[in-house]
Image (cartoon, grey):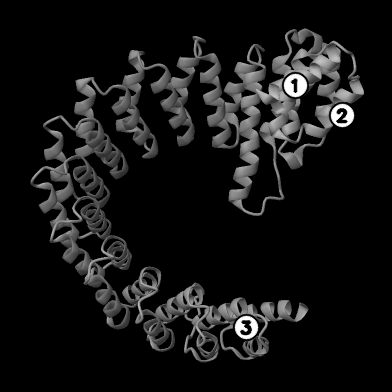
Amino acid sequence: MILSLCAWEFLRQFEKQKTIELDSLIQIFREYWRDESWHEVLRLMAGRLDANFTGNILEYLIDENGEAENFSNLFLAAQCVSEVKNRNDIAAIASKLRDRVKELTKYENSSASTPQEYDNLVYEIRRQAVAAVAATWKDDPETSPWLKQVAQFDNHWTVRQAAIQELVRGWKDDPETSPWLKQIAQLDNNWAVRRAAVQELARGWKNDPETSSLLKQVAKCDNDWILPEAAVQELARGWKYDPKYLYLLKQIAQFDDDRNVRKVAVQELGRGWKDDPEILPILKQLAQSDDDRVVRRAAVQELARGWKDDPETLPILKQLAQSDNNWAVRRAAVEELVRGWKDDPETLPILKQRAQSDDDWDLRQAAVQELARGWKDDPETLPWFKQRAQSDDRGDVRRAAVQELARGWKDDPETLPILKQLAQSDDDSDVRQAAVQQLARGWKDDPELFELLCDVAINDPFDREDQWQENPRQTALAATIELYPDRPQTLELVRDRAQNDSDETLREFAQEKLAELEGQ
């Protein structure tokens, strides 16, 4: 409302008092078009002005170089065109603008440093251009065919997907839209484009008998697993009360050839048909005996969340947490036990067992973290962590215990001595590195820390075997530089490591830091 009043004030001055000339209007756009919070003001102004003035403003915006602002000049100009009541008065400049916005659907930018940055920048501009053309020139007879062309032939799926969505949004009642979407859903060579078409058909043409048949066909027959996933989801949500589709979902959950499609069917059955008497037996069977780990994991999660009070659920979870042959299934069962049965007397022992002896390091680490978060106040937890940190046979368990000790029991009088000991004498370099890291984060005021860091930076026995390994000497050196940059010994230490360390990665790091310190 504040922005609208501001715009009306500008318009009042121009229309009633004639105190704003064309140059002043252009100046207003020149000052504010880069600020998106002003776009509503500028759009309202353009819609209230005489067509000749609006045309001049559009000409100005088109001529601006807006690449640094992601072409917000052109997108603002398109919004301004939408406000003009009689487009015929600005037909030529609007046509010029439309062509410029269409060109943005082919925009390229070589300055993006990473693929992610390129996607975020380039394809967002392209998608925005598609949306702008569809919204601003909806009544242009060329727009719908252009969108169909983009949807079928653009060189990137996200732009094609955007074109499909805009076609449905703006031309749903066009008798050609539904048949065209069905064709795309079945025949397009890109799975993401087919998925977009399937989703739009399911949401916009639910009552068309051909839609459910097509979804059923896609769910069972498409060669790309992501598309059947989408079809299963749309069938479950859009045709929930049709018994033949419930039967289909049950069949897919148990017998489909694709694990991911079966996973989605399991999830939809568990969440949408909890009261159906056949669902619980199906989930129990899949959780315990299905050949595929992805399906077993999904069934475990749905069973735990939807049937917590069933007397067989807890025993099933305990069994799977300890004996399933796949770590991901065991982990899912452990997580569900912690989430739903924290107070069961067997949950804590199972968690400790997994933390100490599970074959998978990821599950061991997850179990350690769950213990620290869920049983911090248990009198047995802190002694257990101290023991694991110092004497567990597995380095990854000791490392996880070190991290949790430092985070959860910083004020315990034994934590600091344990970390110091491990930082200097543990057999595993990852444990030593973690201990050094935690000491630097949590005990920077300890009077002995500087000497310990210097000792580790020089004497730690780390010998690099893989590029990804973290060197405790480098961790200690980095902490020394960060915490004690003004001590003369720090500069001496960095010089020594830059010249004499046996690890090339550390020498390069030290040389870079030395240049920074000497340049100050």
Q: Which residue is mark 3?
A: 507
| Location of the N terminus (image quadrant) | top right
Q: Distance from label 1 to label 3 (Cα)?
A: 61 Å
Task: Tell me whether the residue at label 2 lies in contact with that at label 3, contact meaning CB atoms closer than 8 angstroms.
Answer: no
SS for dot 1: helix
Residue under the point 20% across and 60% down: 325
Q: Distance from label 2 to label 3 (Cα)?
A: 56 Å
Q: Which residue is mark 2?
A: 27
25 relative position to 133: left or right:
right
Classify mark 1: residues with Cα within 10 Å, few (<14), some (14-19) or many (20+): many
Residue 21, located in which quarter of the rendered image? top right
237 relative position to 43: left or right:
left
Residue 365, located in which quarter of the rendered image? bottom left
SS for dot 2: helix
Q: Is residue 305 visible?
A: yes
Q: Which residue is mark 1?
A: 7
Task: Tell me whether the residue at label 2 lies in contact with that at label 1, contact meaning CB atoms closer than 8 angstroms.
Answer: no
Q: Distance from label 2 to label 1 (Cα)?
A: 14 Å
Residue 415, located in which quarter of the rendered image? bottom left
